[in-house]
Amino acid sequence: MKKKLPAWALLLAISIMTAGCGAGATQAGPTGQQEQNGQTVQEGENGTTGGTGTASGAGGQASTDANAAKVRMDDVTALRLIDGKSGWIGGKGWIARTDAGTSGSAGAAWDVQYQGQGTVQQIFALNGQQAWAVMADSGTLLATQDGGKRWESTGTVPKQGQAGFLHFVSFKEGFSGNQYTKDGGQTWSALPVPDHTVGQPYYHDQQNGWAVTQSTEGSFRFLHTTNGGQKWTTVLSRTTEAPLNGVTIRSVERGNAWIELVGDTGMNQTSYSLWHTADSGQSWRAVLANATAGAGPAPGISQQDHQVPKNEGAALGMLYAVNSSTALMGGYCAPCDKPNTIGWTNDGGKTWNNGKQSFDGYGGQQIGMANAKEGWAIFSDSEKAPVMYTTSDGGQHWTQGHVFDKPAPSGS
């Protein structure tokens, strides 16, 4: 019998990372602890877990040590692609990287680059050399400038923005929620946010940001700033039958935003909606409206409105926004034998495609894309080994790429 987490436990776990496909999100379902915006500078039963190990050095620094103990990769909590063949993953106390081998298959072998304390909540990369990792409990921020050969502690993500989605626009300048750094994460300052903000706001850069507010019962507002939070302009105001219990925001291009609203949870079901703008909020499209019998209507969408598409699953999974046209959304169904699904849009939300495949895994769900076509998905489980799948056609087809380590038996 597979173990299925109750909705309240899933919601609690995901609230730690929030997100909204980030910036932070509060979600139900096995949403990955890292949720990414796709931004780059041009973002056997037991699988083999990699070549050279690393042992942690002082200050969080990782140094190469061929004799380091083998890491058990039995729960993947963070994923970040460099390109279609290379990327990083993280888990409890470790970070590993894979690069395409002579066979050309993605994820066939992993090099454990870092071992230390804490669980990796998120990995963000500007390119194949410069990347950061956030540790979930402490908020410790690790950074590398040499592709992961050395990971060093560079600071701490501020508590206020700890659950916010971390993204950098250069090696020095980055954002987490409404927190801003210009020295690579050593120090942070707060950018203004509107009153009654739900979840984490999202600053695309130092001037342009997004937030969702709920000041009165039965309504919410989307707000946008173009002057660093000195003035917030309402760009959408809507009534709702469902209160907001979480918000995820992603802004991968200036003037573009994907906003996910989380409603109620009940009977292992969570209702939610997804919205998109490509013109700085002048117009909005309702991309998804997942109303459920156990959790009620989707936020901002009438229960009688059946015109907005619906994602597969009884609860939301991970949101990954690639660009102004393409976004992927995981679905989760606790009572299902294969609980994970992935849907997508390639036209800014005008149409939605529900994938025909479903996947095992009652634990974490990780989705990452190198571009609109190439991506990876990893699904973890408390009893089975996590499995990695790859796509080269934007999610229409997923192929198994690697099986990681089976979790150790309870009590061992």
Image: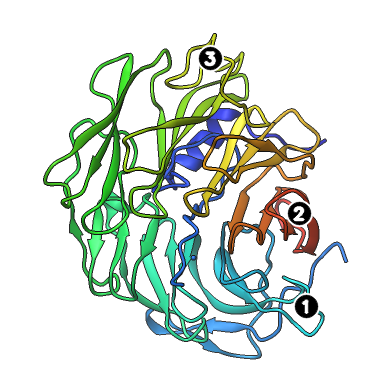
Q: Quadrant of the N terminus?
A: top right
Residue, far left: 230
Give the answer, above or below, for where 163 lies relative to 267: below
* Nearer mark to the viewer, of 3 and 1: 1
Residue 290: horizontal and vertical position, in percent? Answer: 57, 24
Residue 408 makes an appearance in the image: no
User: Between residues 268 and 246, which one lies in front from this camera angle?
Assistant: 246
Q: Give the amino acid at mark 1.
A: Gly
Q: Which mark is residue 409?
A: 2
Whichever of labels 3 and 2 marks the residue nearer the N terminus, that label is 3
Seen at 53% across and 11% down, the residue is 303
Label 3 residue SS: loop
- Give the residue pinned by disc 3: 296
Give the answer, above or below, for where 62 lies relative to 178: below
Q: Give the amino acid at mark 3.
A: Gly
User: Between residues 325 and 365, which one lies in front from this camera angle?
Assistant: 325
Residue 61 makes an appearance in the image: yes
Label 1 residue SS: loop
Whichever of labels 1 and 2 marks the residue nearer the N terminus, that label is 1
Q: How far apart in space, not on screen, are marks 1 and 2 (Cα)?
A: 34 Å
Q: How far apart in space, not on screen, are marks 3 and 2 (Cα)?
A: 38 Å
* Nearer mark to the viewer, of 1 and 2: 1
Give the answer, above or below, for where 71 lies relative to 269: below
Label 2 residue SS: loop
Seen at 36% across and 33% down, the residue is 283
Q: How far apart in space, not on screen, are marks 3 and 1 (Cα)?
A: 46 Å
- Give the residue pinned by disc 1: 104
Q: Give the amino acid at mark 2.
A: Pro
Colour option used: rainbow
